[in-house]
Image (spheres, rainbow, N blue to C red):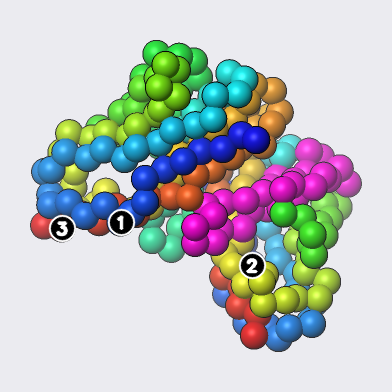
Amino acid sequence: GDSVTQMEGPVTLSEEAFLTINCTYTATGYPSLFWYVQYPGEGLQLLLKATKADDKGSNKGFEATYRKETTSFHLEKGSVQVSDSAVYFCARMNTGFQKLVFGTGTRLLVSP
Amino acid sequence: DAGITQSPRHKVTETGTPVTLRCHQTENHRYMYWYRQDPGHGLRLIHYSYGVKDTDKGEVSDGYSVSRSKTEDFLLTLESATSSQTSVYFCAISESGQNDNSPLHFGNGTRLTVT
């Protein structure tokens, strides 16, 4: 079935380091891809999205490119901040009204 | 923040007791969802609603029921709580279903512990 696989965390970085969180998805249909972020004690918030191959989603310095050839949607940020500490979820959704399938989440810890 | 309120925020209950969680929205969105979040599983869809009195099952619906008598309220009921239902429950809403032009907005969650 449809699934999303994320790298296990936690990912521990120092402030201003480069971030990559890997995400791969099953290659069924033509899914839209998403990154959601969950700050402590809160619900998930949409961070960015891409709806077709080669699209790049970006927001708040984060980027992810929809790579159909490698079925990947890795999240990157050039210089992380302490305030970026959160859990990041990759998700996929087929076109039309289908359920949103989430990965297991990756916790990011950024130290000063 | 989208106007989503979940209540209660925390609940401890005993095995076998009924529990109802409430989700209230002020956005007048048509679609509402209940997810549970567990370590190693991410978020999994329990039930969803696409209108008043219109609901359907998600991937982990066993042991749960839902009701939606008004646009703004979506109730999740555990008829007889079990320890496996200890989890964090999230309500989400969207304006026009789960498509790429209508992202989900989440509430802040309800932490349920079944002892």
x 55%, y 24%: residue:
A27
Residue A55 location, quadrant: top left
Gap in angstroms between the C-alphas marked 1 and 2 = 30 Å
Near mark 2 (Cα within 10 A), the count class, few <14, some 14-19 or many ≥20, is some
Q: Which residue is mark 3?
A: A111
Inspect this view and state whether residue B101 appears.
no
Query: Residue A96, position in %: x, y?
Result: 69, 23
Q: Which residue is mark 1?
A: A10
| Quarter of the rendering occupied by the C terminus of chain A | bottom left
Examine the residues drawn in magenta and state their main secondary structure. Answer: strand
Query: Residue B58, position in %: x, y?
Result: 74, 47
Q: Identify the magenta region.
A: B32-59
Q: Which residue is mark 2?
A: B7
Q: Nearer the viewer, mark 1 or mark 3?
A: 1
Per the image, label 1 sits on a secondary structure element best described as loop
Amino acid type for the residue under numbered disc 2: Ser
Q: Nearer the viewer, mark 1 or mark 2?
A: 1
Horizontal side of residue B79 vs B111, given as left or right: right
